[in-house]
Amino acid sequence: QVQLIESGGGLVQAGGSLRLSCAASGRTFSMYFMSWFRQAPGMEREFVATISQSGSTYYADSVKGRFTISRDNAKKTLALQMNSLKYEDTAVYYCARRRLGDTAYETEAAYDYWGQGTQVTVSS
């Protein structure tokens, strides 16, 4: 059984920074694409960023240039560095593991394990 546990959320002023972390259990973390999603109040969950097993990254247009996804396969951790935060970044942030062989990285159905989420609140 795989567990993903996020941490690092909190309250920050617009323009500030936060760093989210996701700790994974299990022995095969390095084999999987990992991603961050977020869900704002009253909205559907949306893709934020993804990283391949070797570190290639892809971002949603809304966060490109401000957020950086990274991973440490030895420590089985995923991170999201969020800079220049905006009010509209307020959401619950989730890390997720993508199914092997699934290429639809922006689609929730492509993911088999999710964390419980961590709240990020940006005050304007």
Image (cartoon, rainbow, N blue to C red):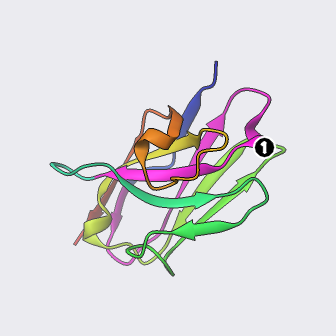
Residue at point 37% right, 74% down?
62
Q: Residue furthest top?
A: 1
Q: Residue furthest left?
A: 42
Residue at point 55% right, 34% down?
5
Three-letter residue code for mark 1: Ser
Front residue of this view, candidates 119 and 93: 93
Residue 16 drawn in magenta = yes
Residue 13 position, x and y percent, is 32, 70
Residue on which the image places disc 1: 30
Q: Residue furthest right?
A: 74
Residue at point 42% right, 57% down?
47
Residue 60 drawn in magenta = no
66 relative to 49, above or below:
below
Front residue of this view, candidates 76 and 57: 57
- Point out the image quarter for the N terminus: top right
Front residue of this view, candidates 9 and 100: 100
What span is in magenta?
11-39
The quarter of the picture where residue 101 lies is top right
Residue 60 position, x and y percent, is 44, 69
14 vs 6, left or right, is left
